[in-house]
Amino acid sequence: MKIVNIVPGFGGTFYCGNCLRDSAYVASLREAGHDAVTLPMYLPLTMLHEPGEQEVPVFYGAVGIYLRQFPVLRNMPGWLEQLVNSRPMLKYAAKKAGSTRAHGMEKLTESMLLGSEGLQHHELQQLVDFLKYNLKPDVVHFSNALLLGMARQIREEVGVPVVFSLQDEDVWVDAMDISYREKIWKMMSDKVADVDAFIAVSEWFAREMQHRMKIPDEKLHVVHIGVNPGKYKIRKPQNNPLAVGYLSRINQENGFEVLVDAFILLKTDPRFKELKLRATGGMTADDKPFLRRQIAKLETAGISGDLEVLYDYENVDPDDFFASVSLISVPVLKGEAFGLYQAEALASGIPLVQPALGAFPEIISTSGGGVIYQPNTAKALAEKLAEVLADYPGLEAMGARGRKSVEEHFDCRKMTAKMVEIYQMVRTR
């Protein structure tokens, strides 16, 4: 089967769980004998490009589609479009603050959902023609529902089923100006009829999106995120010294401030005098002032030397990082649809301490590889971290259960088989 996976690029400047998930998924499809191609949108995939992978253009270049929002540039000449959507320009754009910020992108999101009626109809036709005349897929799979505006034209002109993953769309829409939120959810609901199947990454998020988008039961499926356990070295949690790990984009929304404040509280306990905090995951320009404020708090507390931030995220070896920590905690303020870092940590034998929000309780209950706490405050997190870190045998046991759960429940090869079953089903309808 020929499967085209359409994925928003991120330029490689921070840990993008959705992007890493999609890259691993395409590799797994190929290992299973399918002809799988990744088409990046907005920004290059950068670090996710695999050796020998087919070179394809970046569609809907981030700079070009943004500029089309301005009337004077709506009909920009071809030479200008080519310049602003060149790879060097897109890589530069990826480092800028607004490239991953929902607030201020309301009109652009609305235009994208309008599809052939939006300001990016030229880009949509380019994508449709490339699919129709160059790739000729059997199935087109979009990595998130914010791209729903493209479904109808692809279905009609390319003549193949269109499938959408569901993961964290709410984070983007709910961060918009309040005047746009209801409108965007309504537009997304109206596009459900153009889609053959939706695949949520957790039971919790399936329920959440079914409620928001009115997705009928027969179109909704759940397939957890998976990783290849063979690609991760099994570790024992670090014990000399104990260390709390954080693996995600370093920003406020992902709860890094909650973790820093909890760490400051923990360090007042003599049992954790040598405790370290190790963080990686990269950031955008928006995030740098935030990180400086967190470091300043640690300096005031006299413990800034116990924080290690691995800034050069692109060159961080995941095995080395997991070998250096006792557990992982990413206290995302509003929870997440899944969180790939959880599967990566579990595959490495490293336990999780997560807030009782979003899909975190579902993943930890299924895996047995961690614990949850509530509410999502620094005090509650510090208390739970102290409880877990003080029981090293229990920490080891959780790590072992987590690794076993990846082999049984979160193996990407099993996930791929489930996805292919869904593709085959929609192709025969």
Image: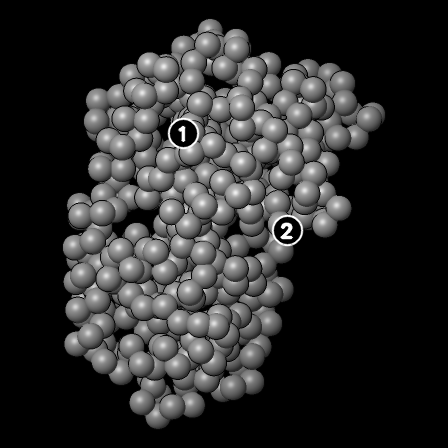
Classed neighbour count for the residue bearing mark 2: other residues with Cα under 10 Å, few (<14), some (14–19), many (≥20): some
Which residue type carries mark 2? Ala
Q: Residue at x 42, y 79 (%)?
A: 382
| Left or right of residue 25: residue 391 | left
Which residue type carries mark 1? Glu
Tell me residue 37's x, y (percent). Answer: 37, 23
Give the Cα distance between marks 1 and 2. 30 Å
> Which is more N-terminal, label 2 or label 1?
2
Q: Is residue 416 above or below residue 402?
A: above
Rendered image: mark on residue 239: none
| Left or right of residue 361: residue 45 | right
Residue 79: quarter of image: top right
Classed neighbour count for the residue bearing mark 1: other residues with Cα under 10 Å, few (<14), some (14–19), many (≥20): few
Tell me residue 367's x, y (percent). Answer: 25, 57
Q: Is residue 296 above or below residue 416?
A: below
The image quadrant where one finds the N terminus is top left
Q: Residue at x 42, y 90 (%)?
A: 268
Does dot 2 land on a helix, a strand or a loop? loop
Q: Which residue is mark 1?
A: 218
Tell me residue 119's x, y (percent). Answer: 71, 23
Q: Is residue 347 above or below residue 113?
A: below
Rendered image: mark on residue 175: 2
